[in-house]
Amino acid sequence: MADSDEGKMGIWMTSALVVGTVIGAAIFMLPVSLAPLGLNSLIGWVVSGIGVLCIAYAFAQVSRLSGDGIQANVEREFGPTVAFLVAWAFWVSNWTAQATVAVAVGSTLSFIGPQFGGSAGVVPVAIGCVVLLSVVNAVGVRAAGGLGIVTVAIKILPLLAVVWLFAEQGVGGAGYEPLAPAPVNVGNLATATALTFFALTGFEAATAPVSKVRNAERTIPRALIGGTIFVVLLYLVAGTGIQMLLPADVVASSPAPFADVLVSHWGRDAAIFAAIAITISAVGCLNGLILGTGELGYAMAVRGDLPSVMTRTRGHNTPVVSQLVGAVLTIMLLLLNSSRATTNLYTFMLLLSTAAIIVLYAVGSLAAWRASTAFHQRAVIVIALLFVLFAAYGTGLEANLWCIALLAVGLAIRAVMHRLNSRAETNLPVVAIPGATPESSA
């Protein structure tokens, strides 16, 4: 058993993968969009938190059935075609998200100092991060997991600092800033819920490298639930703290609200600290996405759904070619993002990534429904499904239509690969067995 577990991730690395992939760059800029929504934003955090926890619970239920991964679990319930669509949507969501997170890394570094090239250096720095972290992941899953633990420990520091200031101001009796006077209605709540939901996606990354996790059917559910609960509570308190420590109009117009809060209490040096920590946060998120993208591409290639070259590995079964394919696709998006004609591509890719991951959430929750029998289990899963529908509505029509188009492309690629594989098997030479008759050799 010791040999078979060599090079695999345990509960701490798997939990760090969950937390590290969820906590990216979005949370640090989200208060800017949420501030004008006032009380709706706080309610949105609660609704999104409950919804995401219910989805994580559904995924944990499915993962307990076996350590085979989300695609295999969905296949048992709905067949290979639906399972492929789920894996394909998961894969597309990951490498599109890699592009947006890499841009966030470049943007934050450009804020730290001109030595990173300013605004002109955003895309080159982003591409460099993708290349560097792809190399780290190529070393092996434990190298990526170890980096995940380090980045999680650093990236939560700005969030914990805001939580500390929020609690300190409350205990000291200084009072809080009033929230923006936005009416609480369905429209504002839908917007707030959609925005906060975007920041909470990523916990599903733990379901990708199942073959690289020790005792996966036990470790993955624990990491999913524990890691997601931790992030939801941290986001709820830190996100609320930002909006109550600064005036609403200041937050809404701030390029770096977390840095502004720290500056107002601890001076200018805190802004540099916050920018560095946010950069590390985005790097950790990108690291987890690259790990998941490589594992997903490899799994589909093993099944014959993608080119067989993506099954090539090194070391402890590290899918280096699949990681390379994901990195190339991400770099292509980054190069498109550097064009003035595609200035809106960043936002579009973010929405497309979310629309694609909603496919995974919906089918994964349905698989959990079919695999569960207890009333309380199905009640939680129903809440997850209702939330998924609400999130799909908030994502918007354009992103959802593009997601459907990409699913169709995936089905076309799968059909071509299966046809090519079938021809290759048909054209294999027949080897005669000495002493056998034609009938027996058939």
Image: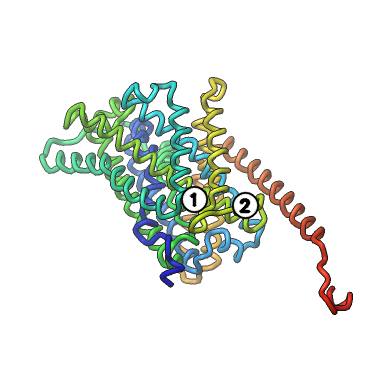
Counting from the top left corner in percent of width and height, residue 22 is at 40, 46
Residue position for label 1? 292
Can residue 380 be seen in the rendering of this structure? Answer: no
Counting from the top left corner in percent of width and height, residue 386 is at 49, 52
Task: Describe the element under mark 1 as helix, strand or loop.
Answer: helix
Q: Nearer the viewer, residue 361 or 34?
A: 361
Residue found at x 27% / y 45%: 237
Counting from the top left corner in percent of width and height, residue 88 is at 60, 49
Establish if 29 lies above or below 384. Answer: above
Establish if 213 lies above or below 260. Answer: below
Amino acid carrying mark 1 in the image: Gly
Q: Nearer the viewer, residue 416 or 430?
A: 430
Q: CA distance from mark 2 to mark 1?
A: 16 Å
Quadrant containing the C terminus in the rendered view: bottom right
Can residue 43 be seen in the rendering of this structure? Answer: yes
Residue position for label 2? 85
Residue found at x 35% / y 23%: 115
Amino acid carrying mark 2 in the image: Leu
Task: Describe the element under mark 2 as helix, strand or loop.
Answer: helix
Q: Nearer the viewer, residue 424 or 153?
A: 424
Residue found at x 73% / y 51%: 415
Left or right of residue 161, residue 430 in this image: right
Q: Which mark is residue 398?
A: none
